[in-house]
Amino acid sequence: MPIFLQRQINTLKKMLLSLGALCEEQVRDSIEAVVTRDVELAQRVVEGDKKIDLLEIEIEEECLHTLALHQPVAFDLRYVVAVLKMNNDLERIGDHAKSIAEQAKYLAEEGQVNEPPFDLNAMGRRVEQMLRHALDAVVNIDVEVAHQVRVLDDEVDIMHASMYGRAIELMRENPHQTEQMVHYISVSRQLERIADHACNIAKDVLYITEGEIPRHGQIRRENAVEAASEGEGENA
């Protein structure tokens, strides 16, 4: 790899990890704001989303500059393309953290609020763990850790489904709690979406190392099997 391209890729990695650190902080603070009913903390998260948006633009511009100037190939090309995709996922994570903070502000200002119909701390910790592992996988290009993130995503999906069912039950039993439950459902949904984006980042690590887009891998395998079967039929 040319030394100038290596430097550029290192720059992209540092910028992406800076964005990841900002997103981790935003997610952590947004969850804490809901749990503690901290309006000031929630407002800081809302305002902090601007930093994420600005850095996302800088990273995209740097990626395009790298592609145009250095014309990377093979692993290096996949890495730059993956950074573009991960950059977008991290920006969306920031948006979801902002949405959670906005729900926190409503719940805090509402006054008498019932406890959430799910273990918010447990779900939040699991989502934070997914994001941390996804970023670790990026730093070390670690396929094993990337696969772990995808397993954890299934657990978060189960948590969200369980919470949603419980919230619906509570709304039927206590219609006056409907508005609060809707906000809690939104918080859970935002956390589930953050987990999905962390999973996307993990998939991009697999793309960097294996050169296959994971979400289309199964389709390719099925097509290959189908083509092979047709070939056998024609030869028979």
Image (spheres, grey):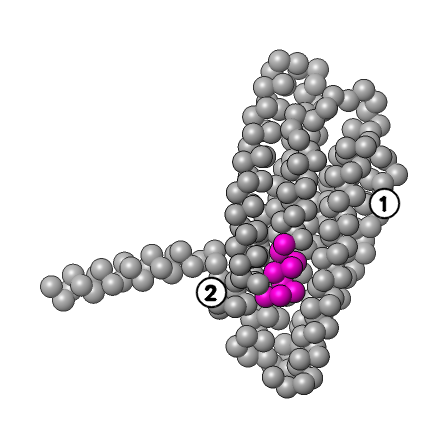
- Dot 1 surroundings within 10 Å: few (below 14), some, or many (20 or more)? some
Q: Is residue 52 visible?
A: yes
Quadrant position of the C terminus in the picture: bottom left
Residue at far top of view: 173
Vertical relation: 23 (above or below) 33? below
Determine the residue positioned at 47% across, 65% down.
Answer: 212
Residue that label 2 marks = 212
Across and down, in percent, residue 216 comes to 44, 58
Q: Position of residue 217 (x, y in %)?
A: 42, 59
From what the image shows, is residue 235 above or below residue 101?
below
Task: Say if residue 194 shows up in the picture.
Answer: no
**Residue at label 1?**
44
Q: Residue at x 77, y 55 (%)?
A: 22
Q: Residue at x 52, y 47 (%)?
A: 151
Highlighted magenta segment, given as a residue range:
133-141
Earlier-in-chain disc, 1 versus 2: 1
Disc 2 marks a residue whose amino acid type is Glu
Give me the disc on residue 156: none
Query: Which residue is at the far front?
Result: 144
Q: Is residue 46 left or right of residue 94?
A: right
- Is 140 included in the stretch rendered in magenta? yes
